[in-house]
Image (tube, rainbow, N blue to C red):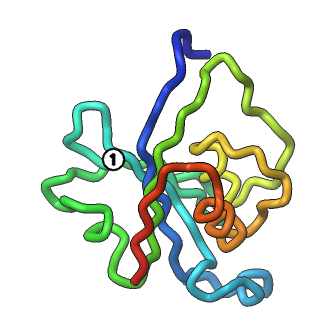
């Protein structure tokens, strides 16, 4: 566990369509069927991308010289919500949940809302929440 005071980070949450064919995904809002989180690396040269896939967690570094903006990485069809999150490292953020793309993003942001299961619910929570935010719609 990290020591020190509150940690403030800027995260970009990207909401997209899903390429998976599954009965559950067909019941989600089409433009909000998948989500992942991105933030700038400490040195600022890379994007840290945290993406909960169907079968695994994918964490990657993408160079900013190839993708200078979040939009250039996410694509034109994505909805992007940028928020500043302040978390206290001394507080635990462990809870029981089903591991989904939404849950992975919630863990990145420190959100422990039990009633937030789908990407669209997370989107609604974020735009109506108490975060400083910037929203980029298509």
Q: Is residue 55 visible?
A: no
Q: Secondary structure at mark 1?
A: strand
Q: Which sits in the foreground, 6 or 16?
A: 6
- To which quarter of the image does residue 30 belong? bottom right
Pick the quarter of the image with the N terminus. Answer: top right
- To which quarter of the image does residue 126 belong? bottom right
Q: Residue at x 72, y 69 (%)?
A: 121
Horizontal placement of 19 versus 119: left or right?
Answer: left
The relative height of residue 36 versus residue 110 in the rendered view (above or below) is below
Q: Is residue 1 visible?
A: yes
Instruction: Determine which residue is flagged by label 1.
Output: 61
Mark 1 closeness class: few <14, some 14–19, many ≥20 residues within 10 Å = some
The relative height of residue 132 versus residue 74 in the rendered view (above or below) is above
The percent position of residue 87, horizontal first and vertical second, equals: 58, 30
- To which quarter of the image does residue 72 belong? bottom left
The percent position of residue 79, horizontal first and vertical second, equals: 46, 75
Horizontal placement of 47 versus 22: left or right?
Answer: left
Q: Farthest residue to the left: give it.
A: 65
Q: Residue at x 56, y 84 (%)?
A: 31
The percent position of residue 38, horizontal first and vertical second, equals: 42, 52
Horizontal placement of 24 versus 59: left or right?
Answer: right
The relative height of residue 110 versus residue 119 in the rendered view (above or below) is above
Q: Residue at x 60, y 53 (%)?
A: 105
Q: Which sits in the foreground, 122 or 34?
A: 122
Q: Residue at x 52, y 57 (%)?
A: 51
The relative height of residue 124 versus residue 52 in the rendered view (above or below) is below
């Amino acid at each position: 566990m990290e020591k020190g005071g509150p940690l403030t980070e800027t995260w970009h949450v990207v909401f997209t369509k899903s390429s998976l064919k599954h009965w559950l995904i067909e019941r989600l809002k089409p433009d909000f069927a998948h989500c992942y989180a991105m933030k700038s690396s400490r040195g600022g040269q890379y994007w840290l991308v945290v993406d909960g896939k169907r079968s695994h967690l994918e964490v990657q570094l993408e160079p900013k010289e190839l993708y200078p903006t979040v939009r250039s990485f996410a694509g034109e069809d994505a909805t992007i919500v940028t928020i500043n999150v302040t978390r206290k490292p001394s507080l635990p953020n462990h809870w029981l949940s089903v591991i989904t793309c939404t849950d992975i993003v919630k863990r990145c942001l420190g959100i422990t809302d039990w009633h937030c299961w789908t990407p669209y619910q997370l989107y609604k929570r974020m735009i109506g929440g108490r975060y400083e935010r910037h929203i980029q719609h298509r």
